[in-house]
Amino acid sequence: MSLKKVLALTLSISVCMAAAGCKKAPEDAIKIGAIFSVTGGGSNLGAPESKTAKMLVDEINAKGGVNGKMLDLIVKDSESSPEKAISFAKQLIEEEKVFAIIGPSTSGETMKIKSICDEAKVIMLSCAAAEVIVNPVAKYVFKTPQKDSHVAMRIFDTMKKMGINSIGIISDNTGFGNAGKDQLEKIAPQKGVKIVISEVYDKKATDLSGVLTKLKARNVQAVVNWSIVPAQSIVAKNMKQINLNVPLFQSHGFGNIKYAKEAGKAGEGIIFPCGRLLVAEQLPDTNKQKTLLVKYKKDYEAKFNEDVSTFGGHAYDAITILVEGLKKAGSADREKVRTAIENLKGFPGTAGVFNFSPQDHNGLGLDSLVILTVKDGKFVPYEKLD
């Protein structure tokens, strides 16, 4: 058997950890499917999500599970492929008979299986960000990252404070990039910001100097890049190389310190909105999220010896929201759990405090986002935290 097949098989093995160690899942365990981009172009998202989900399920099962039942986590690596996400979703629903699905990692994959889960009446808690995932609302589909419309608003509000009125946008050709571009172009006029040029690049691009030269020729006051691929660091480097010396704003897809480290000195000063996880220790003690953020951050970094990212946090939120739904329902009754999630209020997660409703399957407001920047290779607050 090839190494690739061995790895794929390993990722697909059910995870059911009790205090005594790894054990086979009992017959009455609650099966949870997970589709993550553990490898491929979205690995910076899916890898920490997979690690987080397994870590949490281990912790929950070690404490006796949920409502007296163990959780049986079945992780599938989509390799960042929408086609594989479709195949795995059908397999998890039809063959594994999972109770719910966590993920996928990317917006493109999520949109491919949104209708599959909804029609099968299987709860899906996506770890992807595009607002179209929950707008329009699908009865069984929820998502944990903040809305891209709110991210766009926070970017424009920050620009206005800086006196920036004329900008250029670049975005990758993924589902996330396309959705973000649409929101930026929709909201800019409302915020009094003029988009003088908007360009789309291939997600596999390794040099964006040509695209950025077009923006430079239009004398933009700032650049907004909306992507989740390694281009986030390439943009910063290329801007430096062509002397495009204006502020660079990124989406909440920049919430992994690896991107800043890959950008090196060129990444200094990048501005972006995200949740509070990356600056957890700096939050005031009165913040409702602080205790869980600090614990998750410390647990993750100690266990995996790597920096926590907002992406792992999306999986944290998906698991804990599902567990809370199970507790409130009192049993693994899918309809009762779905209803419990849909009516969950004041529930603190890594992305913010969730307040779901039948009209809102994301449950996060503008206040879930803070503005961070890169200083000395680290993420620091751009403005006062609350």
Image (spheres, rainbow, N blue to C red):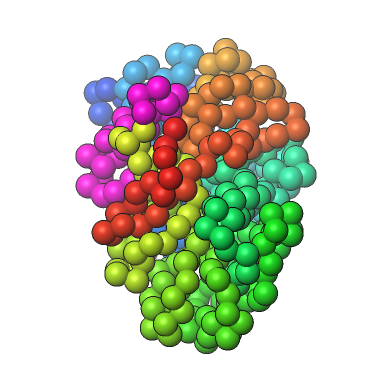
Q: Is residue 10 visible?
A: no
Q: Magenta span covers which residues? A: 284-308
Is 268 on the left-hand or right-hand side of 226?
Answer: left
Q: x and y percent of residue 300 in the render?
A: 30, 39
Q: Nearer the viewer, residue 99 or 47?
A: 47
Does 309 appear above or below 351? below
Q: Nearer the viewer, residue 227 or 235?
A: 235
Does 250 appear above or below 127? below
Determine the image quadrant of residue 20.
Answer: top left
Q: Split into 4 quadrants, where in the image is the N terminus?
A: bottom left
Is 95 on the left-hand or right-hand side of 135?
Answer: left
Residue 294 on the magenta segment: yes
- The residue lying at 74 percent from left, 40 percent from top is 138
Q: x and y percent of residue 154 in the render?
A: 58, 49
Q: Main secondary structure of the magenta part?
A: helix
Q: x and y percent of residue 83 in the render?
A: 61, 62
Does 104 appear above or below 266? above
- The residue lying at 57 percent from left, 43 percent from top is 146
Q: x and y percent of residue 139 in the render?
A: 74, 35
Q: Is residue 93 visible?
A: yes
Residue 256 on the magenta segment: no
